[in-house]
Image (tube, grey):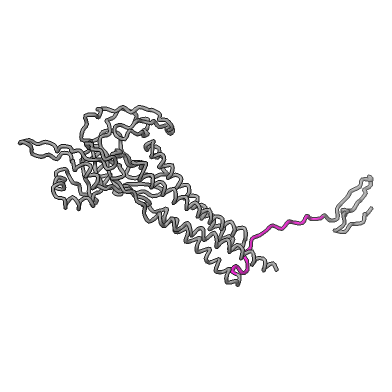
Amino acid sequence: MLSRPASPSSRRSSSISTFDHGGISTVQPLYCRVPAKKKSQSWKVVCLPLPPNTFYRRSLVISLLLTSFGSLVFLTATMASTWESVHYRYDKVFQYLDFNFVNIRTETNGSLSSNPLSAQPHPTTGSYTVPNFTVELLVLQNGQTITPAQIEGLRIKPELRARSLKRIAGLLVRLSNLDSVPNRCTVRPLRKRGVLPPLHKNLAGRPLYNMESYYLDDELSKPMDPEVAWIIMDIEAGIWSMSYEKPRVYSEQLAPSYYNICKGPSIGLPSLSYLSSNVSNCTAKCSQFFLKMQNNIIASAIVVYLSMLVSIIIGLFGVIFRNVPASMVTGVLHFIAGLFAIFVNCIHHTKLSRLRNEWGPCHPISRVPDRLYDPAFITVNSHWPLIVSWISSPIFLLGFCTWTILTQLMTTENSKMMI
């Protein structure tokens, strides 16, 4: 028996029924409906990426230029290594020390005797105290080493002193009176209130003048000689690292002389990366606050990097396909980049202000007694990368405005195409 086939638009299925000799019915479909495939959205390059509207074209060119220029300016500023510098005023240091150099002897009653210490007023407190420091070694910027015998000529001839002070690269200062210094200093693990040592580190008491605390590895927790000598050098620092201005002089001349005098705690390398794992080895007082602010600067700079990278990718996508949401997101990313660039600069200014007035010897690579790291002895300066970084902030904010205008124009042009 044949059933009437249904049309494709009918709800009845089209089939044919047959009966065999046993009376069993067999149904065979004549045809079946194939489900319609859903159309997937495909991105296609617009036939006319640049509409004839002159204002649209100018806005597009200005937006792309501001994006590229702002990213280049901020990248140039943050990659520089001289955001800040700490320079010693060696004339003030020598005035405080009264040019009391070690191993310089004068003739007294037919015998040699050391130059006596003289009481000098402290630059900040004004009190007259006998400085307990002597200059062991002086190195010029060209690598020339001035021995104590040659330094005597600087004391006699002021014109030589003024000319040499401008060329000093570093000093090695040591204690002149060791009567109050113990022969051995046992480094024992201890905890300081409010400061927790990092994992696998022992918080050890720092001997002598600084009276701070610093971290030592477990294998270094043993009796050692006290710290009786220090290296004084100018420091320069960027966002990612800090170093001495003359690292070669530090490594080849001052550091070996330090170990010849002081058998105490080892000194660090001439440079330090803020992203390295040895940052926790620094002092536990102001240096921790210094590093926290530096970490905030690095985090804000990374946010700017990510914002600009994503804005470039999304911005190109929005321009090529004339996509309004992509252009809108690009403008918002420019605003975020400009805002965090301001955060970078403000945090850096706050850090410099505290270095000048409050914190003292906070740089992790600098271990100098507090009495020799006086605000009267140092100058903390900012350099051109900070100014360039400030320039990038209004560029990003101006880019936010131009991308917002471009989004409105793009919406209008897309509406014209639909009509």
In the image, residue 208 sits, relative to residue 253, either above or below, namely: above
User: In the image shown, does 194 or 206 lie closer to the viewer?
Assistant: 194
In the image, residue 42 sits, relative to residue 294, either above or below, namely: below
The residue that appears at 24% across and 49% down in the rendered structure is 168
Count every numbered label the image shows and give the total: 0
Q: Magenta segment, which residues?
A: 33-50
What x and y, as percent, mark residue 304? Answer: 49, 52
Q: Is residue 247 visible?
A: no
The residue that appears at 49% across and 61% down in the rendered structure is 68
Residue 107 image-quadrant placement: top left
User: In the image shown, does 326 or 397 lie closer to the viewer?
Assistant: 397
Q: Residue furthest front?
A: 126
User: In the image shown, does 28 or 234 lie closer to the viewer?
Assistant: 234
Q: Magenta segment: does it hold 37?
A: yes
Residue 112 image-quadrant placement: top left
What x and y, as percent, mark residue 129? Answer: 23, 36
Q: Is residue 271 left or right of residue 168?
A: right
What x and y, as percent, mark residue 209? Answer: 29, 34
For the stretch drawn in magenta, what is the main secondary structure? loop
Q: Is residue 332 left or right of residue 295?
A: right
Q: Magenta segment: does it hold 366?
A: no
What x and y, as percent, mark residue 180? Answer: 24, 29
Q: Quadrant of the C terminus?
A: bottom right
In the image, residue 304 sits, relative to residue 190, either above or below, namely: below
Q: Is residue 21 visible?
A: yes
